[in-house]
């Protein structure tokens, strides 16, 4: 059963104790299948983030399995550019306790900046995203949802969020991920490889550098049930894009980044290369890391 088939129930009020030792301060976000709360940890004497399945979907085991799988991964993984999970609980209901991150998402940053980031800042961001993605690939996972709203930046340090769509390389149905950031092979469905995440890195750098996503619908000012800019489709509980299935990335190449902004030619070529429609034409994560790193100032 999806949220549209059930009566949507309100989030938990402030002061609720979903599990022993944790108290809800307030709702941070509500997605198509999950509630995210600002919370207080009594053991740590600090704020934290609690992720829970929306109340109207708690009778469905799939969202809970998805949430707990992400929580287990983020407890096990240790990387400076990945968000951390502290604990997972299955009773009295499934939830994941995450660290509270300072800073802001790239999506918010893009919206408020009067000037586009410097080319070296774009390259540094790319190196950090490559580092996180390389780590995930080394553990047999593709992220498959790289986008500005899944990256938090604080004083130049980026952290990648949300492994709820992550899965091993292999066959996948059409639409796994977020509409405007899907690689063509994600939009089409079929074999997904590490090249799909290279596309996601490129799409993120494209929007950070140029201020606009490489692909969007004409009705881009509307918001969907996950609050994403320019995506009017909804998402089922497996993270697949539903609704209008005309994916522009299957119909045409992304406009070159030079159409939005002048960048150093090597950086522009890297971003455009990440968005090559054929996965074989994209750089590998290692190649992308080396090429982006070469654009950074030498350490003093």
Image (tube, rainbow, N blue to C red):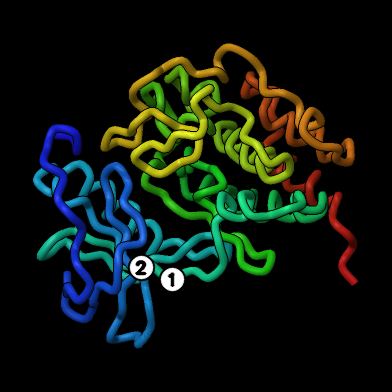
260 to the left or right of 6: right
**Tag 2, which secondary structure?**
strand
Residue drawn 26% across the image and 37% down it: 237
- Cα distance between the residues tagged 1 and 2: 6 Å
69 to the left or right of 16: right
**Tag 1, which secondary structure?**
loop
Q: Are the residues flagged by discs 1 and 2 in contact, CB closer than 8 Å? A: yes
Q: Which mark is residue 152?
A: none
In-front residue for pair 197/34: 34
- Where does residue 149 sit, x and y in percent of width and height? 51, 49
- Where does residue 158 sit, x and y in percent of width and height? 61, 60
Q: Quadrant of residue 286?
A: top right
In which quadrant of the rendered image does the N terminus lie? top left
Residue drawn 35% across the image and 85% down it: 44
* Residue 34 can be seen, yes or no: yes
Sequence-earlier tag: 1 or 2: 2
> How many marks can you see?
2
- Where does residue 280 sit, x and y in percent of width and height? 66, 23
In-front residue for pair 178/233: 233
Q: Quadrant of residue 241?
A: top left
Q: Quadrant of residue 96?
A: bottom left
Mark 2, Cα crowd under 10 Å, few <14 / some 14-19 / many 20+, is: many
240 to the left or right of 101: left
Residue drawn 79% across the image and 28% down it: 259
Q: On the image, numbered disc 2 is attached to which residue?
A: 49
Q: On the image, numbered disc 1 is attached to which residue?
A: 100
In-front residue for pair 196/237: 237
In-front residue for pair 38/95: 38
In which quadrant of the rendered image does the C terminus lie? bottom right
Vertical relation: 79 (above or below) 8: below
Residue drawn 47% across the image and 30% down it: 179
Mark 1, Cα crowd under 10 Å, few <14 / some 14-19 / many 20+, is: some
């Amino acid at each position: 059963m999806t949220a549209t088939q059930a009566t949507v129930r309100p989030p938990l009020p402030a002061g609720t104790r979903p599990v022993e030792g944790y108290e809800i301060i307030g709702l941070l976000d509500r997605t198509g299948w999950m509630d995210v709360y600002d919370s207080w940890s009594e053991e740590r004497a600090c704020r934290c983030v609690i992720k829970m399945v929306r109340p109207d979907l708690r009778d469905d085991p799939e969202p809970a399995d998805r949430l707990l799988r992400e929580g287990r991964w983020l407890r096990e993984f240790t990387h400076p550019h990945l968000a951390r999970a502290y604990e997972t609980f299955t009773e009295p209901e499934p939830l994941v306790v995450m660290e509270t991150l300072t800073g802001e998402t790239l999506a918010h940053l893009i919206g408020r900046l009067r000037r586009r980031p410097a080319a070296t800042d774009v390259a540094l961001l790319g190196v950090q995203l490559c580092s996180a993605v390389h780590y995930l690939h080394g553990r047999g996972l593709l992220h498959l949802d790289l986008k500005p709203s899944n990256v938090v930046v604080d004083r130049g340090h980026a952290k990648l969020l949300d492994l709820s769509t992550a899965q091993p390389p292999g066959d996948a149905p059409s639409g796994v991920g977020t509409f405007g950031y899907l690689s063509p092979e994600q939009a089409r469905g079929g074999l997904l490889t590490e090249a799909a995440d290279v596309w996601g890195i490129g799409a993120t750098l494209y929007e950070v550098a140029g201020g606009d996503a490489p692909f969007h619908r004409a009705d881009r000012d509307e918001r969907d049930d996950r609050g994403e800019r320019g995506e009017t489709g909804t998402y089922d509980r497996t993270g697949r894009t539903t609704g209008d299935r005309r994916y522009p990335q299957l119909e045409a190449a992304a406009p070159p980044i030079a159409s939005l902004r002048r960048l150093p030619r090597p950086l522009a070529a890297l971003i455009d290369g990440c968005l090559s429609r054929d996965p074989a034409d994209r750089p590998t994560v290692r190649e992308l890391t080396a090429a982006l790193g070469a654009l950074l100032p030498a350490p003093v």
